[in-house]
Image: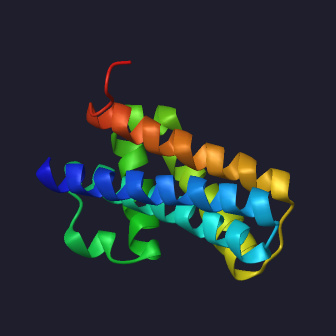
Amino acid sequence: MEQAIRYIAEAEKFMQAALEELERWKRSRADIYLRDAAEKAWNAVVQATNALLASKGAPEEALASHRGRRRALSKLSFEDPEVKRAGLRERYGAREYHLHMKCFYEGDYIPEEVEEEIGKARRYLEDVKAILGLNQPS
């Protein structure tokens, strides 16, 4: 679980950085800030997924590539009812496409959509934390 906690800490740092970049974009409307916000939110999803997979015993090589993560998350979604109920496999793929590929790499975005996707990335992180029992009581 120690490794998962480290990954969650990284995910939270990336999510905070994404929110900061989003605020910079709101002030300046400079394209680079919104695209950076999307990529940082995507990295928060990646780190949260690494935490989940590491805690569930996925091999280290599964955490080393997007392909490895996708395959391990797919397998886990068929083995773990809580992961399946949360729809993490589908949500991971959606965030990868909208934040990483479409917005960051292709520069193809609608600002409101990116804001919404960042919110979805944030909820993904919170859901992974809940599955791992790492949510702090409010």
Q: Position of residue 14 (x, y in %)?
A: 45, 60
Left or right placement of residue 124 versus residue 48 in this view: right
Image-quadrant location for residue 7: bottom left
Q: Nearer the viewer, residue 127 or 67?
A: 127
Relative to the observer, which residue lies in front, 133 or 16? 16
**Residue projecting furthest to the right:** 110
Quarter containing the C terminus: top left
Residue situated in front as seen by the camera: 29 or 86: 29
Tell me if residue 98 comes above or below residue 121 in the rendering: below
In the orientation shown, which residue stands out farthest toward the bottom? 105
In the displayed orientation, state which residue is furthest to the top.
Answer: 138
* Residue at x 80%, y 53% (from the top left corner): 113
* Residue positioned 50% across, 35% down in the render: 86
**Furthest residue toward front:** 27
Expressed as whole percent of the image width and height from the top left, the position of residue 33 reads: 69, 70
Horizontal relation, residue 110 to residue 85: left or right: right
Q: Residue at x 87, y 60 (%)?
A: 110
Residue 41 in the image: above or below residue 101: above
95 lies left or right of 3: right
Q: Position of residue 96 (x, y in %)?
A: 60, 65
**What color scheme is it?**
rainbow
Query: Residue 87's image quarter?
Result: top right
Residue 60 versus residue 30: which sits nearer the camera?
30
Tell me how many marks there are: 0
Give me the residue at 14% from left, 47% from top: 1
**Residue 53 at what x, y percent from top left?**
30, 55
Residue 77 at least partly seen: yes
Q: Is residue 82 left or right of residue 61?
A: right
Kindly tell me whether residue 93 is visible in this rendering: no
